[in-house]
Amino acid sequence: MDSLILQKRKRQFIYGSLFLILFMTIVVTATMGTANIKVLESLKIVIHQIPLLGDIVDISAVQKNYVVIIQSVRLPRIMLSVLVGIGLSISGVTFQGMLKNPMADPFIIGISSGAALGATIGIVLRLQWAILGISSISIFAFFGALGTTFLVYNLARIKAKVPVTTLLLAGIAVGQFLTAIMSFMMVAFSGDMHRIIFWTLGSFSTKSWTQVKMIFIPVLLGWGLLRFYAKDLNAMLLGEESAQHLGIEVERIKKILLALNAFIVAMVVSVSGIIGFVGLIIPHIVRLMVGPDHRILIPAAGLVGGIFMLMADTIARIIIAPMEIPVGIITALFGGPFFIFLLRRKKNSLL
Amino acid sequence: MKNLMRYRLIITILLLILISIMFGCSVKNNEPIENNEPIENNRTEEGTQNYPIEITDGTGSNITLLHNPERIISLAPSHTEILYALGLGDKVVGVTQYCDFPEEVKDKPKVGDSFSIDLEKVLELEPDMVIQYWGMNDELKKQLVDADITLLTFSPESISQTLETIRIIGIATGTEEKAGEIISNIKEKQQDIAAKVKDAPKVKVFYEIEYSSALWTAGEGSFIDEIITLGGGENIAKDAEGAYAQYSVESLIEKDPEIYITNTFNMELQSYTDIKDRPGFENIRAVKDGRIEILDGNLLSRPSQRVIEALELMARAIHPELFEN
């Protein structure tokens, strides 16, 4: 009994401290930016934003400019990067578990190629409409991602079963094919080439509360649902046959996880473009910290992913101010070495 | 064993044949380009040219021209405009698909665009001179050189560089006098504008190249930055560098420009009102005062004789009160 209680305490400690770090990071990064806003003033503006507490603080003395910057530019960007970080890492964790492949990332079954092609079509068609403030490009990217998953799934399945290897291979093949079409379109419509490239590079730069509202519920809901299937994921790690013998309906779970992940990733990619590395590395980093049990891994990876993405975006927007670096470059530059550092520490501790 | 020996012998002989074929093909291209043709002493209508002449193109390479070019291909819309302005329209035998000024250009044969050049088409048109903006890859360059086609490269990014380009193309094509005319005309108009805006207060301007997945502006050292400054404005994005810089929206809002300028290419995707709806933009002076100017994208991106029109357009947008006519 003792060890179980310890485990629960340990888990609570991990979640608690991670959540605290996330919160602190949000508050701190809200005071950082290219505009020269004093720390105290920015804190005041942030608190004012919180629905009930807000009225305690009086911001009438603060420059209107600054209020607008923090409320309409910085805060939505911060919240969006956290949500995207969560989405990418939890789907990275589930794909790695489901496919039993440490190299899996959220885009492995061709989702990124599908989204990019969708966005390319949206950009090239120059459609001017937007539904509820969401641009046609985002919508096309979203359906591109979902459509690709559907295609890959159907290519890989044999009656009701989806063998993992076939899924991976089909994903690679379809991904390459769609990328080829996208490259062709880039050349055929070379006037739009730069616009397409900017989209694929990924950025949180011009995003507003609209995007946050759009992915808020899907990501958090998806997070909860994935956590619900954590035990099944644990069992699947033992091998599909063993899991089957333990009573897990492997094929059904695979389908559900695939659909959930595809949805989360499609949402994330449609608002932020394709940001690599996070979904691949964060699961491994967190696994080194808390172990492979998905019941802890899924919540923890989400939190760590959110923190990491937020820090990466903050660096991207302040390091060469007033210019910005595409955030995907930052995630790659910092994610890699940090992971190597963790790996070496783990290796040393095993000696 | 005997069969094995024979097999190896045959393979070796085949390989040797193959190698000598490859050698043979490459040897053909090593003939000297300058052969013993009599040097033509060509006088143009203006009677000022004495070939052969040596010029330095935009990349700093020295190029020798043996005769007046009669068939010219232009690989950039701006170069096409320059050629027509110099009166060489009849000598232009090929252009890119993006060349659209002046009107007559649309009937000329197309040889591709800046990214992909149809080399076969180019060679088919038998030009003696090709003028490009960006350097093509070495393979293509070599093919042109081997076919005795003079290749000039000019990539002007400022007004002075553009004028220099016009001047050198003028020398190369025997139209020096016309080039001089164009250049002094532009310089005069430039001085006019400078005089007009000299005493006017500098207006804070922001130029948006694009606002899609990020905000892009033209920073210090770019053509847009130059014409904003010459037009009596202050580019608030001076602290960014280069012709294409990703800028922070926070900085834009903090610096609060009085005029917000963008171009027609960009606006194709959005409407005027969309700018006001962007997060944080409603607080910018330029948006509140309705000082959003949308300028002709073509004019702003052609470093040809029309740079002066781009400058006029910009100056008018920044100081409308000084250009009432």
Image (cartoon, coloured by chain):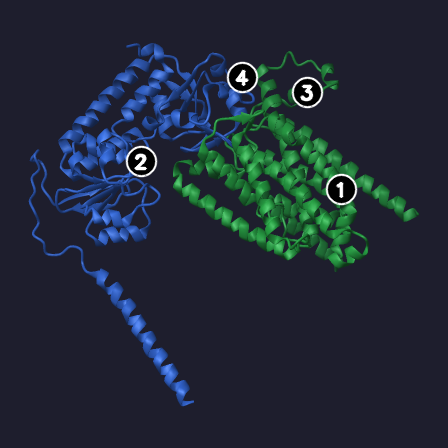
Which labelled disc corresponds to residue B282?
4
For residue A36, which quarter of the picture?
A: top right
Task: Work out whether A285 lies above or below B160.
Answer: below
Q: Amino acid at mark 3?
A: Gln
Residue in the image at 62% along x and 21% along y: A71
- Mark 1 and 2 residues: CB-CB less than 8 Å, in contact? no
Q: Colour of chain A?
A: green
Q: Of helix, strand and loop, which one carries label 1?
A: helix
Tell which of A217 and B165 is nearer to you. A217
Cα distance, mark 1 to mark 3?
30 Å
Cα distance, mark 4 to mark 1?
41 Å
Looking at the image, the residue that sits furthest to the bottom is B2
Q: Amino acid at mark 2?
A: Tyr
Q: Which residue is mark 2?
A: B98
The chain coloured blue is: B
Locate the C terminus of chain A by quadrant: bottom right
Q: Which residue is mark 3?
A: A49
- Mark 4 and 1 residues: CB-CB less than 8 Å, in contact? no
Q: Amino acid at mark 4?
A: Glu
Instruction: Tell me how many marks there are.
Output: 4
For the residues tagged 4 and 1, is the chain the same?
Answer: no
Cα distance, mark 4 to mark 3?
18 Å
Q: Of helix, strand and loop, which one carries label 2?
A: loop
Mark 2 or mark 4: which is in front?
A: 2
Looking at the image, the residue that sits furthest to the right is A1
Pointer 2 local density, CA inside 10 Å: few below 14, some 14–19, many at least 20: some
- With A49 as the anchor, is B148 left or right in this view? left
Residue in the image at 26% along x and 30% along y: B101
